[in-house]
Image: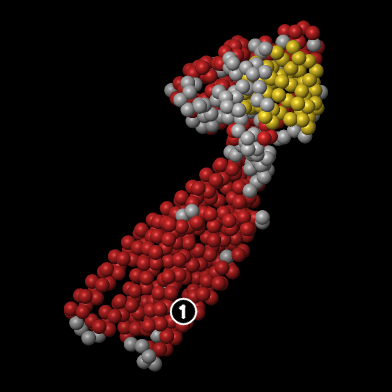
Amino acid sequence: MGADTAGRGVIRRAVAGQRRDVAVGSVLGACHQTGEALVPVLIGLIVDRAMVRPDGGALALWLVVLAVVYAMLSYGFRFGARAGERAAEQAAHQLRLDVVRRVLAPHGGAEAGRPPGALVNVATEDARRVGALNMALTLGIAAVVGVVAGAVLLLRASVPLGLLVLIGAPVLMALGHYLARPLEHRSQAEQERAAHASGVAADLVAGVRVLKGLRAESAAVARYRSTSQASREANVRAARAAALQTGLMLTLTGAFIALVALVGGRLVLSGSIGLGALVSAVGLALFLPGPIAVLAWVGAELAKARASAARIADVLAAPGETTGGTTEPVVPSTGELRLYGLGHAGLDGIDLTVRPGEHLGIVVTDTADAATLLHCLARRCDPDRGRIELDGTPVTELAPAALRFALLVAEHDAQLFDGSLLDNVTAAAPAGADPQPAMDAAAVDEVAATLPGGTSGRIGERGSSLSGGQRQRVALARALAADRSVLVVHDPTTAVDAATEARIATGIRRARTGRTTVLVTSSPALLAATDRVVLIDGGTITAEAPHEDLVRDHPVYRTAVLT
């Protein structure tokens, strides 16, 4: 399905989901526009019936009618705009949820080729633009009613003037749609450039400490300056297209109104219409640019919404990294994990059984092979050969979301989020579970002692207020607090001191008693606390024994963990 077709689907869903508010807003907006059109007609009637031939009673009556119409149009605009704005905000909110849900989907893939800042831009600015179409649609329907009401009232005053409006207004609308096409293309380019600039900025902020350490600030600034300049230029081009479209529409609208006034003036001079009808005609001629301008604005908003909708559709339709299964894991899970002839990238023929409740260590001499193993276990990719089974069921047959509730892979570069320390630890914990054992096991009490407010203290975006070792401990506590049947942890203590590492090794063993735990690490302290260790060298299993035996008998293992 093409991006344009998919984008139209996003727009249809955004509008259909809020059709009640759009309908209410459109009706009330139509009341407002009809009232606006009636005002010059009522003034013309007052001129003819109460002023040309002075009549105090008639004047008072028509003034009351005029006041009622003003009240109607005022409240119609107020509550109609409220309904339209509510529809816009709710649609944007739902689109943001859809984008976030897709990004966080267990089968992944939405983030491929897109920096975090670009995804944020799609979930915020693009969602806002598509949601705003509901407000534009509400005002646009009301504007159409206003144009029709003005034309009908003009027909009653003068058939030539009414026909002129009925023919001219659709022509102006068609021209507005045609003129909006360049704006659509430039708006899409603008959003893409803005998303890229946001992505670069997010990456630079995330790595600011590394950049300072490398003294690469000037190169980073130059990179962002170039990206920002490209974004600014795209924004200027889009603004020029919008200004050109708006200016041309205003010029065409002004010419159209001048034509209406010219024809009306000639009719007055010929005696075809009276003074009151002239006042009404002039008033309607002054009224009509409003709804016609709204229709031109709606065309511009539609162009922007279509460009943003195509970007949202691109994220929502992104192919997953893995295809989803449908089988639910065994409940309760025994925690038995088996690898049969696993082959992928550098791994070749891995046969391994992790017994229920076992505390297993895995040492991989090649970091690339370790990453491949973790990706296969987390099902971020499926192996080229062989299979992985959880409690006797191939993981490819398990629903991705359900799999993650049974098997958790806590990778080395796990990210923290802005919030309190306790919120980070309990992010994936079962409802009502006590997080204290997990925090004790990961030595998080020492981290809490350094924060104002203890466990309630905020740790900053991505844990920016913490050291590397402190971030590792909080991430480990979060993985332990999740209390999964099978937990795979990758190098959780590379940035902590030896004494803390020994405490954590004992803590993990205690916290995971009776639960299957796999530690992919080269830490002697962590490996010493395992039941057995498997050595993967050259992509295959070359040794399997308790840590002490491997240190004594296997040179490759001794080199991997002691140097």
Q: Is residue 97 above or below residue 267?
A: above
On the image, the x and y values in percent for residue 92 come to: 50, 50
Q: Position of residue 134 (x, y in %)?
A: 48, 57
**Taking 156 as reference, is 485 left or right?**
right
Find numbered disc 1 in the image and state the secondary structure of the residue it sits on. Answer: helix
Q: Is residue 492 visible?
A: no
* Identity of the residue drawn at 68% across and 23% down: 337
From the viewer's perspective, is 147 left or right of 100? left
Residue 479 as seen in the image, left or right of residue 420: right
At x 33%, y 66%, the residue is 73
| Quarter of the view holding residue 375 | top right
Q: Quadrant of the C terminus?
A: top right
Q: Residue at x 72, y 15 (%)?
A: 533
Classify 10 Å Cα crowding around label 1: few (below 14), some (14-19), many (20 and above).
many
Residue 54 visible somewhere in the drawing: yes
The relative height of residue 158 versus residue 67 in the rendered view (above or below) is: below
Residue at the image point whose x is 32% and y is 85% from the top: 275
Residue nearer the viewer, 119 or 152: 152
> Residue lying farthest bottom?
270
From the viewer's perspective, tell me whether residue 478 is left or right of residue 110.
left
Establish if 447 lies above or below 400. above
Q: Nearer the viewer, residue 305 or 19?
A: 19
Q: Which residue is mark 1?
A: 165
